Image: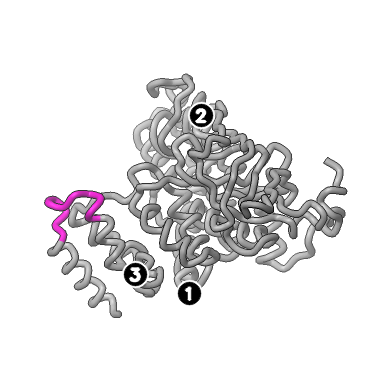
């Protein structure tokens, strides 16, 4: 199908389903059924099997027509990480069950990966999943931490240890978990901003049907790496206009505060402006490469760059604003707010500065991402790992 034919297909759909006269849920379900949700997904799963590069054109046509948003509840984890994982590694039954309500924003997802003792070393996780011989279900016990949006989530992607007798990377299995199970307890984690967008999640005898397992038993590390590659692309490889994101915020602050102009601040702004533009163009190239296949380790470099630039730009913004930048005026300020979504560029300068501190931790720490880039992109020798071939149960903790 040519771009012109795809454009005609969208126009025919809009003529048959006028956004202003079609109920939101019905419109989104019809769009999914027409293959105009993810055009690069296979037919029958919201797509048409077309190149990923055609998706922005489709999104632009629907936006111009006033079509309803399919992501009103901030389902970035579901759309950016879960959907491609289920498509690649899931069963046909899992694709049929989860992809449509996920895309339509009817079911929200979170990610149960990190643990108090297994953050950067995710393969060291201790949450156990034990098979019940009588029912075939998996009984899960453990604790997860830094779970974005768990308080709003309907389902979660979960990695758990199913075999402690083999080395840590080989004894992990990947599951889909119902967050409404009575054994799931979500507790808020207060951040430096005063808000609680993250959570810790306790799992007590949660029963997971084997039909909710993704991939083979013990193959969870491979599936999880596919998810993490998608996460880093979603964070660092998103499309942005020139002078978009935090760069646009800082540039506007510079224009508004002539009283704060100094040669030193001007030099830093220009250097960061150039670096942000290089990152934006690199992101465009990365998305072109993604149109040809699955995301690879190059997405780690983009996420690494995003974190560094966001922190440096938010710090520069504070300096340009001077004392005014230290005012925390957002309602409700420092209270234990439970935001619906992450906001990197809105609200107060001091909020943006504090929130950016998490950018080098969430979605993979910058230290780990440098190792990934060094080993998997540049081909440098890997870091020594003395516990790589030791059974997990024998590794000191």
Dot 1 crowding, Cα within 10 Å, few <14, some 14–19, many 20+: few
Q: Which residue is mark 2?
A: 196
**x and y, in percent, of residue 205 in the image:** 63, 39
**Residues at circles 2 and 1 in contact by the CB criterion of under 8 Å:** no
Query: From which residue to which does the magenta span run?
Result: 17-27
Quarter of the image for the N terminus: give it. Answer: bottom left
Quarter of the picture holding the C terminus: top right
Residue 299, x across and y down, in percent = 56, 60
Mark 3: few, some, or many residues within 10 Å (few <14, many ≥20)? Answer: some
Q: Where is residue 339? Give x, y as percent.
A: 43, 32
Magenta-colored segment: predominant secondary structure: helix
Q: Nearer the viewer, residue 15 or 315?
A: 15
What is the quadrant of residue 284 in the picture?
Answer: bottom left
Residue lying at the far bottom of the rendered structure: 1
Tell me the mark number nearer the camera, choosing from 2 and 1.
Answer: 2
> Of the residues under marks 2 and 1, which one precedes in the sequence?
2
Compared to 349, does 287 lie above or below?
below
Give the total number of marks visible in the rendering. 3
Examine the rendered structure and indicate whether residue 1 appears above or below residue 7: below
Residue at horizontal 67 percent and vertical 39 percent from the top: 142
Q: Would you say 11 lies left or right of 327 here?
A: left
Mark positioned earlier in the residue sequence (3 or 1): 3
Q: Secondary structure at mark 1?
A: loop
Q: Which residue is mark 3?
A: 54
Residue on which the image places disc 1: 292
Residue visible at 44% across and 37% down? 152
Q: Residues within 10 Å of mark 2 (few under 14, many from 20)?
A: many
């Amino acid at each position: 199908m040519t771009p012109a034919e795809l454009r005609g297909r969208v126009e025919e759909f809009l003529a048959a389903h006028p956004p202003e006269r079609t109920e939101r849920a019905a419109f989104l379900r019809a769009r999914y059924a027409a293959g105009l949700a993810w055009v690069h997904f296979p037919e029958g799963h919201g797509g048409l099997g077309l190149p990923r590069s055609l998706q922005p054109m489709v999104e632009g046509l629907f936006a111009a027509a006033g079509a309803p948003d399919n992501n009103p509840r901030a389902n970035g984890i579901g759309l950016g990480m879960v959907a491609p994982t289920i498509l690649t590694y899931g069963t046909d039954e899992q694709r049929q069950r989860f992809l449509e309500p996920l895309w339509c924003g009817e079911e929200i997802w979170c990610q149960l990966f990190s643990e108090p003792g297994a953050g950067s070393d995710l393969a060291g996780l201790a949450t156990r999943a034990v098979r019940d011989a009588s029912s075939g279900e998996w009984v899960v016990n453990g604790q997860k931490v830094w779970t974005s949006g768990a308080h709003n989530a309907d389902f979660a992607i979960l990695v758990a240890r199913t075999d402690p007798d083999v080395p840590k990377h080989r004894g992990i299995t990947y599951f889909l978990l119902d967050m409404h199970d009575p054994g799931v307890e979500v507790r808020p984690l207060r951040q430096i901003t005063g808000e609680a967008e993250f959570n810790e999640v306790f799992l007590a005898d949660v029963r997971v049907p084997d039909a909710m397992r993704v991939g083979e038993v013990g193959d969870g590390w491979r599936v999880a790496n596919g998810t993490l590659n998608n996460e880093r692309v979603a964070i660092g490889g998103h499309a942005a206009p020139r002078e978009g994101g935090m760069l646009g915020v800082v540039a506007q602050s510079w224009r508004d505060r002539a009283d704060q102009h100094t040669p030193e601040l001007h030099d830093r702004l220009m250097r960061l402006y150039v670096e942000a533009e290089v990152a934006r163009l690199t992101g465009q190239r990365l998305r072109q490469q993604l149109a040809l296949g699955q995301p690879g380790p190059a997405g780690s470099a983009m996420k690494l760059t995003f974190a560094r630039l966001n922190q440096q730009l938010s710090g520069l913004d504070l300096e340009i604003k001077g004392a005014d930048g230290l005012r925390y005026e957002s309602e409700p300020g420092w209270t234990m707010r439970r935001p619906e979504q992450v906001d990197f560029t809105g609200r107060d300068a001091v909020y943006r500065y504090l929130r950016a501190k998490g950018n080098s931790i969430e979605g993979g720490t910058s230290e780990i991402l440098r190792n990934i880039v060094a080993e998997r992109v540049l081909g440098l020798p890997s870091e020594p790992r003395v516990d790589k071939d030791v059974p997990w149960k024998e590794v000191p903790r």
